[in-house]
Amino acid sequence: MAKKQAGLSDAMSMALIRGEREIGRAQAAKDTAGIKEIFGGIADVVTTSLQKKKKREAKLEAYAEALGGVQNINMLEDDYNKQAVTDFVRTKRDEYNEAAKMYEKTKDAKYRDQMEAVKFSFENLNAQLQGLVQEKAEYMTSFEKKELVHLEGDEKYTDIYTNNSKFSIEQNGDVGFATGTFKDGTSKYHKLKDIAGKWNTKQYDTELLVLQNNDTAFKIAQQGKDFPRDSIKNNYNSTLKQSGPKGIRVMSKTDISGEDQYENLPDDLSFEALWQTGGLLPKFYKNFKAKDGVKWMDDPDNAPMLSDMLSEYLTDVNHYTHRENFKAKREATEGRRTSDTKEKGRNLTNYGYRTYEQMDEDYDYIKEGDTGDTITVKLGGKTTSLIRSKAGYWVNKFGDSEKIYTRNQVKAMRELNHLPNYEKADLSFLQFNANE
């Protein structure tokens, strides 16, 4: 499990809600009303998800308390599987004795085979009961370490490993469990050998990578260097894809803030939880909308898309750290302080006095927004309006002709050179030379 790095959690927690400033208001709410205020129409979905998680954890906590430690897990447990095993052994022992008598009497090989089948079923049952003890121990240990991540359908593991399922033994000694109760009264059956080791835990490699990239973002910001967005995002995508569809889905459910600061919100401030609010940036809702729910994330065919979205989101987290520390470095260099008696802005040649907050808002506006957005700049001493194109660059139209400017060129026009450059965009298809 990745260790928390000092000084990172606060910045990362703030980064998690970047683009969703209203979530901050929920810190002051004391009950479910706070959730409904922030999450709007999907509040019930979020609340239900939280309730399911609490119910699942209640089962685990109750079993852990009754158990008194994983060292106390036994192959046979009263009121669970002991009677089933006893009955199985008695029945098979009778079968073996009967087959032995018939073999002794007839020497027919089929009775010998029956005897061997019974012996195999005993050996198989013993091995599977030992395996079940190991599975329970590992599962409960992961629960105690807060490493478990439950995907769609993973409720069966909680029921099975806390003795909340119906234990059974097949003729060959295979162990199985019936979980859940459907409307028709039936349950779903699971063989131990089919589910063993397939429950999910946190993706340590990706979580560690988030911390490492955050540390890198902090260091290069202090050095006044640009944020290497493309390389960081590609690194995330590569790591996530190596973990496979399940690993990608696990990471989407993982709270990377490492803090339980928002007591009235779902306590897994994960990408999934924040995406459901509908309050992340528009780029995260191009293919699916929040109102449609998160079922699409469970489809393995959508894993590449989810991986790309997660990579973009985690890169945003690191970029936020870079920008905040780049700004802090700038402020320290310029001798700016937060005191009301100190300077909070500067006089710009073409735009008069502007606060640093206003300049930061300009910076964000230039970076991304809707097609058709406009911004005024000074060109040749004249005020000119530029229009944001669909591709994200800015256009100054002159009748039937137009001149194109990159975001960094517009940033310079707005006299924001004290802020870091935007990542380089691939504008080669425009066939013009731009200093971006």
Image (cartoon, rainbow, N blue to C red):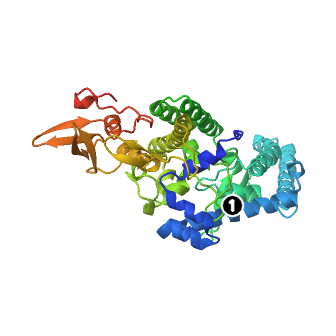
Image quadrant holding the N terminus, namely top right
Residue 237 placed where, x, y %?
50, 36
Residue ranking furthest to the front: 341
Label 1, secondary structure: give it. Answer: strand
Horizontal relation, residue 12 to residue 67: left or right: left
Residue 199 placed where, x, y %?
67, 48
Horizontal relation, residue 206 to residue 421: left or right: right
Quadrant in the rendering for residue 209: top right
* Residue 49 visible from this viewpoint: no
* Up/down of 146 relative to 59, above or below: above
Quadrant in the rendering for residue 433: top left
* Up/down of 102 relative to 164, above or below: above
Residue type, numbered disc 1: Ala
Image quadrant holding the C terminus, namely top left
User: How many numbered discs?
Assistant: 1
* Residue 58 visible from this viewpoint: yes
Horizontal relation, residue 300 to residue 106: left or right: left
Closest to the observer, 101 or 298: 298
Closest to the observer, 197 or 230: 230
The residue that appears at 70% across and 40% down in the rendered structure is 6
Residue 239 placed where, x, y %?
55, 34
Closest to the observer, 435 or 391: 435
Residue 256 placed where, x, y %?
62, 47
* Up/down of 415 relative to 279, above or below: above
Quadrant in the rendering for residue 90: bottom right
The residue that appears at 35% across and 49% down in the rendered structure is 369
Q: Residues within 10 Å of mark 1 (few under 14, many from 20)?
A: some
Query: Which residue position is annotated with label 1?
Result: 178
